Amino acid sequence: MFQAFDSAGNPAVGRPRVALLRQWLAENGLDGFVVPRADEHQGEYVADRSARLKWLTGFSGSAGVAIILRDRAFIFVDGRYTLQVRGEVDLGIFSIESLVDNPPANWLKDNLGKGARLGFDPWLHTIGEVKALRASAEKTGAVLVPLEANPIDIIWKDQPDAPVAPVELHPIGFAGELAKDKLARLAAAIGQEGATHAVLTDPSSIAWAFNIRGGDVPHTPLALGFAVLAADGRHRLFMDSRKFSRQVAAYLTQLAEPHEPGEFEAAVVALAKSGAKIALDPVLAADRLRMLVEDNGGEVIAAPDPARIPRATKNQAEINGSRAAHRRDGAAVAKLLCWLDRQKPGSLDEIAVVTRLEETRRQTGEETQMPLRDVSFDTISGAGPNGAIMHYRVSRATSRKLQAGELFLLDSGAQYQDGTTDITRTVPIGQPTEEMRERFTLVLKGMIGISTLRFPAGTRGSEIDAVARMALWKHGCDFAHGTGHGVGSYLAVHEGPQRIARTGTEKLLEGMMLSNEPGYYKEGSYGIRIENLILVTPAEQIDGGDIAMHGFETLTLAPIDVRLVRSDLLTRDELHWLDTYHARVLAEIGPMLDGETLAWLEKATAPLPHGAKI
């Protein structure tokens, strides 16, 4: 199994470990310390060695920050984790704060007194984060203190070693462009920014630029390391050589000068002393890098990671690979849903469904000679009230039976060499209530609204996020997460910078892949989410229109459970979209199924009655 079920947070760890940290703070003249859920690369997933927030607090979510003071402790989480955090941290130790409404930079103004010394690890905070924290601290007369060593690493006596998973080459048939050509494009972009060099801190950018994949973090095929790209083409890669086979080492040596990770800081210092102009992404790069450059006479050029937009705008090989991966994955999900329909209510628990789905994906991959490489994230398998926990992570301690009269939310994804998938389906166990059907249909209307949207060039995700919420808003409902995140190509399932959300400021460009996943969550009762992946299509003229418009191609292929659909709440166009989508699902994944599963799919994708809708 790619997914473990015994790694949920443990609230019992907080009290003794916070006491150890406070002892260290007192011995070193500090009044507090900031513990982010981050490593040196600011990725969503961190290696076991870097899971400092979980080790200290028990919280296992993918986003959060703790601030430990001498006499108080706080943990900041966003709307996805407001329920989960209460079950994973000791509420006798930690007060819960909103990472969105009252982030640490705001919180400091009201909670740090004059002269207070707050420590932080500059490797674990971005340039932008530290700038905001320092500005806030200065307003109260507090001092933000960068530390040479992280105190968690000092008190964590059995901290795991850094990972050294093997690096593999990503074939040109899937990558669609040679690494040397990608690196040449990036070198030109660096020069256009007025920089001599750029530091790639995001392992996804390194994987994309060098056409390599790794296994250093869970569920995302990344090799941790840094790269210093040069406008003159003399690039350097800082990565543990134990990860390289002879073939991989020979390949990488043709693209960049190889170095061990321990040489990275000295190399940045040497460049700075030579007067280099080094591009750092304020959103991604650690503040430690800014310090190394500025303290040694170099110039920091604030510029976005040059690989982010090229990586986000998929080429034709990546698009074709994603389409193939989604057909294969859709067939696997259909097999799972058919199997689930045959089980008696109360006979399965959440873990049983996760296990069966992974087996089905493995089997389908073997049948099509495209093996399942990993799941793309820990499957969210939420029955009844667990489905209302937006990023619920099933464990042996929390796994519930799928009971009659409840909803079951299944959010899962897969990593194949030709593409990354992410799909959510919500199904009824037994007879759903009318409220459940109404809320499901409102969510569906939002998902269809995004699916059918046309929009001009330059449109940002923030400008279309409301489309997914309008039907819910009219009924006094909403959901506390973004509508869509970017998706990589056999890379991170949550990829920036593109997103559909209130904070989605990046323009949506042709070739970008995103999720489309509105939802509704009734605390203590049920959760609903419907998710497809979508692709931004080329701008095309509309008959009679003045401006060419982009649209979305739906990539995900699996039936939406019509037992939860109230067709009287759908317009004729919405019903037509659903019928057309289901006809496409049957046509594209039907040939990969047979027998009972094919018969089930034919029934699941049958047209709904349209009545006299307008």
Image (spheres, grey):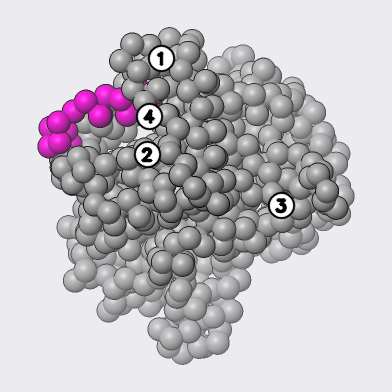
For label 1, the residue is 593
For label 2, the residue is 562
Looking at marks 1 and 4 on the same chain, the residue that comes earlier in the sequence is marked by: 1
Judging depth in this view, the residue of 411 and 417 nearest the camera is 411
Q: Which residues are magenta?
A: 334-349
Which three-letter amino acid code belongs to the residue tagged 1? Leu
Q: Assess whether residue 335 is covered by the magenta stretch.
A: yes
From mark 2 to mark 3, how far is it between C-alphas? 29 Å
Looking at marks 3 and 4 on the same chain, the residue that comes earlier in the sequence is marked by: 3
Residue that extends furthest to the front in the rendered view of this protein: 612
Alpha-carbon neighbours of circle 3 within 10 Å: few (<14), some, or many (≥20)? Answer: some
Which three-letter amino acid code belongs to the residue tagged 4? Ala
Looking at marks 3 and 1 on the same chain, the residue that comes earlier in the sequence is marked by: 3
- For marks 3 and 4, give the one nearer the viewer: 4
Q: Assess whether residue 411 is covered by the magenta stretch.
A: no
Q: Position of residue 490 (x, y in %)?
A: 55, 30
Which three-letter amino acid code belongs to the residue tagged 2? Val
Looking at marks 1 and 2 on the same chain, the residue that comes earlier in the sequence is marked by: 2
Q: Residue at x 46, y 80 (%)?
A: 108
Q: Residue at x 68, y 24 (%)?
A: 317
Where on the picture, by quarter, is residue 263?
Answer: top right
Which three-letter amino acid code belongs to the residue tagged 3? Phe
Question: Secondary structure under badge 2?
Answer: helix
Q: Position of residue 60 (x, y in %)?
A: 32, 51
Where on the picture, by quarter, is residue 257?
Answer: top right
From mark 1 to mark 2, how far is it between C-alphas? 20 Å
For label 4, the residue is 604
- For marks 1 and 2, give the one nearer the viewer: 2
Judging depth in this view, the residue of 306 and 416 nearest the camera is 416
